[in-house]
Image: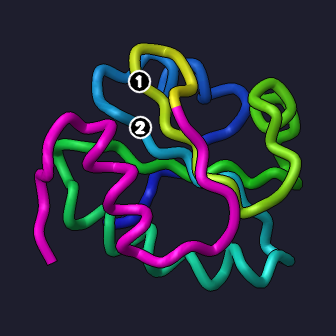
């Protein structure tokens, strides 16, 4: 399962208006740590399919959303719920750390591995 590519134009609809917890991967093609974390984000998108929405924002092509939410370094994963940014994780962190953050904000441990 691949995260949805989101642009500044679709950010409102895909992220802020989403009923689900939405994890936004702010990344850029030249970013080594972004490339390291991308397969983990894809795995998690598959594991949490139907329960948590995963999207990607290319910060080189879309500057408004990263600027609005204070993204200063990439990769940054933003956790959005109810139209608000509720948490961020910066850097290429282990899968277990991302799962813990997702589970905390999704309200329960909804996946195992």
**Quarter of the image where one finds residue 36:** bottom right
What residue sits right under mark 1 in the picture?
81
Above or below: residue 81 compared with residue 24? above
Mark 2 surroundings: few (<14), some (14-19) or many (≥20) residues within 10 A: many
Residue 25 in magenta stretch = no
Front residue of 101/62: it is 101
Residue found 87% across the figure and 47% down from its top: 72
Left or right of 44? Residue 95 is right
Q: Position of residue 100 (x, y in %)?
A: 33, 58
The kind of secondary structure element at disc 2 is strand
Left or right of 111? Residue 45 is right
Q: Are marks 2 and 1 in contact (CB under 8 Å)?
A: yes
Front residue of 10/54: it is 54
Left or right of 62? Residue 82 is left
Q: Which residues are magenta?
A: 87-113
What residue sits right under mark 2 in the picture?
22
**Quarter of the image where one finds residue 43:** bottom left
Image color mode:
rainbow
- Image quadrant for the C terminus? bottom left
Residue found 57% across the figure and 26% down from its top: 85
Residue 95 in magenta stretch = yes
Residue found 54% across the figure and 36% down from its top: 87
Give me the C-alpha separation between circle 2 and circle 1. 6 Å
Above or below: residue 69 compared with residue 89? above
């Amino acid at each position: 399962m691949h995260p949805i590519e989101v642009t500044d134009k679709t950010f409102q609809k895909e992220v802020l208006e989403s009923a689900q917890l939405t994890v936004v991967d702010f990344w850029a093609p030249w970013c080594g740590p972004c490339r390291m974390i991308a397969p983990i984000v894809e795995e998690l998108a598959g594991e949490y399919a139907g329960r948590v929405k995963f999207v990607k924002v290319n910060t080189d092509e879309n500057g408004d959303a990263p600027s609005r939410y204070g993204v200063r370094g990439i990769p940054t994963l933003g956790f959005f719920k109810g139209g608000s940014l509720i948490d961020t994780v910066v850097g290429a962190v282990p899968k277990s750390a991302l799962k813990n953050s997702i589970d905390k904000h999704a309200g329960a441990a909804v996946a195992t591995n």
